[in-house]
Amino acid sequence: MPAFAMIDVVGFWVGIFLTFCILSFLYDDNPFYKLAEHLFIGISIGYLMVQQYTDNLHPKLIVALGEKDGIWLALRLVAIVLVILLFVKALSRRWAWLGRFPLAFVVAFYAGLQINAVANAELGAQIQFASKSLDDPKVDLNTAPAEALTSLPGSSPLVAEKLVAERAQRPFTSLDDATTRPSLTPAERQDLAAARGTLVGLDASASVKPGQQNWFGVLSNVLLLLGLLTSLVYFYFSVAHTGVVGRVSKIGVWVLMIGFGASFGLTVQGRLALAIGRAYDVLGRTFSPSDAAQIKAPYVSLISIVIIILGIAGWELRRRNGRGGPGTAEKT
Amino acid sequence: MSATEQKPAHWSEKLQTFDRRWIFLAMSLAIVIPLFFPLGLPAKPDPMTKAAYNAVESLPPGSRVFVSLDMDPASTPELEPFFKAVMLHLKRKNVKVVFGTTWYSAPPLVERYMREVVEASIAPAGTAGYSGAPDRPYVKNVDYVNLGFRDGKGAIIQLFGSDLRKAFDGRANDGTALDQIPMMSGIKQLKDFDLIVLLNAGFPGAKEYVQFVGTRYKLKMIAACTAVSTTDLAPYFQTGQLIGLVGGMAAAAGYEDLVGKKGAGTSGADVLNIGSIVVMLAIIFGNVVYFVSPRRRRGGR
């Protein structure tokens, strides 16, 4: 890959410096933090405006006004009129009511779009899933289609294909037999062996005879049903939450709390990943060795830290001497 | 002891007012130290990640895949490792790829990805620590097409579903007419692709794809999302509306494990484990301090 141009290298340096500027907020709301904050907002808005113009306004309005087709031209004129009406709302109190038309158009458009989509994808599919049978039959290795074999623990599309070919030659007599057939590679056998387990592993979800149940799966389905019903009871306000209903709704709260706990844990992971990403960048770990040699991220990080510490020290001294401008009163 | 003389504060009460920046410092150390001294903790794929891998693995060579890069720079630590891993997976299966995005902040990222991941070889022959098939650099408008960005949130996704060419005015991002690109022949809408791969950092993203086009056109879709979105999208995996889901950096590490090339996801997951331990310790510490507080035991708050 070609070396970065100098302007790109400077871009990386600025990125590292601004990262430390943002982190300096841990000390206090200081000028370095404010610089980074204002730059971020300014650049974001500038970028968004240019992009909206080049991607939307120019091709879909300005260029499109040259359209010869009468109907499409008329529709574009309607769009312009709606935009103008939106501005009227801000400019004139007397004619502000005109601004309701574009807002009504947007709200109605998205409501129509969303109702159909949500009814289709959320209500239909989710209710269908929630009302499925509590049964969870094991996958029969001797008759199941390749797709079902692929979903088994330790399996893959390639393993499933091999199992289908193997059973055509000689039906499986046991799971041990199925997972040690000669066409499987040592790595595939190892994966299947590692996935064995009577609770949630291969033994729990696959068999060589029809009609066997995955009891852990059945238990999961029962728990899912109970969790769903108790959560729904919690949100059912037409009956007072006392007695049996109260106790059931309390279980529903616990189910919800488990769900929120999972969300919280994943949120923490997401924030940690952000911190890891920045740590990688300021230490130059995301670059190839040649790029890292060009950017010299660790040195830039060190210099940035020194500049910020010296700057904040100077700013703090000025503030303590009463010459720091806004914020002086609160600190002293 | 006189009545006015105050009893010294209980240790738990002193700790309740300690500076939270000590936690930040502990977290910084937990993140930076493993970068220099990796522990090499295992990163095993979960069933949803494995299902995503299987969906790509079962594509025949020459298949065509649509990749929607609905992300921004803030989400790159979580999504970029998956993107690199799935691109290696797709490229070594010689799959043709069409890229698009509905995020205004994505185009500069997409350009970088085209340059560094798609048009360059990710794992050429002889790559250290990689024993899989090597990939080759993809050629623009031959092996891949970048359609670019289109605004419109859910509405534009709906148009992708019914008429992809119309949504992009019949042209690729570089202005080439889609009719002149052989790999685009026969592709009019999302349903014409063998698989849809969604990189999702929020709205609009995988959820909108499921709602507006996935269920309606019965599309085969896998998604990679930020960790925070995993619980939102997991129900779609259970119902089969998504046939695979890679949630966050830890799951991306699992995908890297399946593809056989360790990258930023694997090393990041190592750090993530340590960071998670620090968070758990902080939660336990906070609860202990709260529950042993004399004021709380007296019934106060």
Image (tube, helix red, strand yellow):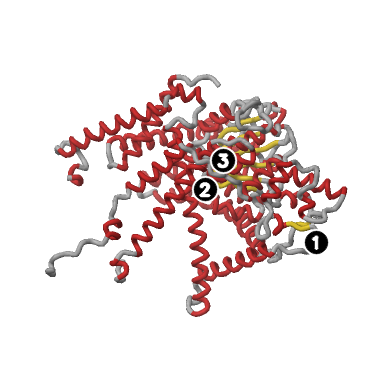
Which label number is shown at residue B165? Answer: none
Q: Quadrant of residue A115?
A: bottom right
Residue A75, label in figure: 3
Label 1, label 2: how far apart the Cα atoms are: 39 Å
**Residue named by callout 2:** B227
Nearest-to-viewer mark from 3 and 2:
2
The answer as to whether the residues below labels 1 and 2 share one chain is: no
Q: Position of residue B69 (x, y in %)?
A: 57, 38
Task: Find numbered disc 3 in the image and state the secondary structure of the residue it sits on.
Answer: helix
Instruction: Tell me which chain the residue with mark 3 is part of.
Output: A
Residue A35 vs A116, above or below: the answer is above
User: Closer to the observer: label 1 or label 2?
Assistant: 1
Badge 3: few (under 14), some or many (20 or more) residues near its Cα, within 10 Å? few
For the view shown, which residue lies furthest in the bottom direction?
A243
Q: How far separated are the C-alphas under marks 3 and 2?
A: 42 Å
At horizontal 61% and vertical 40% (from top left) the residue drawn is: B257
Quarter holding the N terminus of chain A?
top right
Q: Residue at x 67, y 33 (%)?
A: B132
Q: Pointer 1: residues within 10 angstroms few (<14), some, or many (20+)?
A: some
Report in which chain the residue with disc 1 lies: A
Residue A210 tag number:
1
In the orientation shown, which residue stands out farthest toward the right? A169
Mark 2 residue element: helix
Three-letter amino acid code of the residue under disc 3: Leu
**Is B222 placed above or below A35 here?**
below
Provide residue B76's location: percent of width, then percent of height.
50, 38
In the rendered image, is residue A320 in sight? yes
